[in-house]
Image (spheres, rainbow, N blue to C red):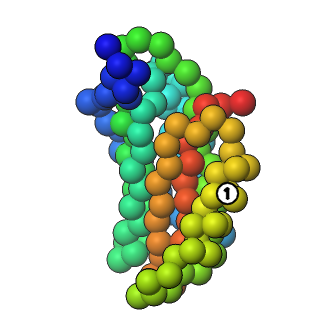
Amino acid sequence: MSAISHQVHDKFKVFMGKLADDKTIGGLADEVAAFASANKIAAKSIGVEYLESLQRIVITLGYSDEGDHYPIRLHCVPMGKIDLLGSDFTALESAMSAASARQKNIICHELYLTAEGDFLMVFMTLAD
């Protein structure tokens, strides 16, 4: 069986909360990590959506409860402002690469945007 089969999953957990003052996911990062640890699951993916009208962030955690489990952490990194109608994302791509270089053992990433054009990336990593 190929290595990609280890990424397959069919279980999900939903978390919802308010953004922190700096527009990051704040305490939700700890909630997601605590769930993974307490339930001894293997985290596989995350989804992130900012609901501007409700001023709430939704994080979905995709996981498997079969096989090995491992501790995770979520890291939210502001990337700056983005021109949502622009077509040249070279500077943004460079910022994303620089942010990922500061993370270790990235499992996956997700992003969200605010109505003000704030661009933030969320990395799910193996915990240190």
Q: Would residue 78 appear left or right of 46 to someone viewing this image? A: right
Q: Give how far across and how far down residue 5 sits, in percent.
A: 33, 22
Q: Nearer the viewer, residue 65 or 81?
A: 81
**Quarter holding the N terminus?**
top left
Q: What kind of element bears circle 1?
A: helix
Residue occupying image coordinates x 50% and y 18%: 69
Would you identify the image quadrant in which residue 97 lies? bottom right
The residue lying at 60 percent from left, 61 percent from top is 96
Image coordinates for residue 15, horizontal then vertical, percent:
41, 47
Question: Is residue 80 depicted above or below 72 in this figure?
Answer: below
Q: Is residue 34 left or right of residue 8?
A: right
Side of 94 where 66 appears, left or right? left
Vertical relation: 126 (above or below) 29: above
**Residue 127 percent coordinates (x, y):** 65, 31
Residue at x 35% of width, y 19% of height: 2
Q: Please state the horizontal and vertical placement of residue 94, each as a whole percent of the image.
A: 63, 66
Q: Residue furthest left?
A: 10
Residue at figure coordinates x 45%, y 24% from the top left: 42
Q: Is residue 118 visible?
A: no
Q: Is residue 11 visible in the rendered structure shown here?
A: yes
Amino acid type, callout 1: Ala
For label 1, the residue is 99
Crowding at label 1, few (<14), some or many (≥20) Cα neighbours within 10 Å?
some
Q: Decide: is 16 above or below 90.
A: above
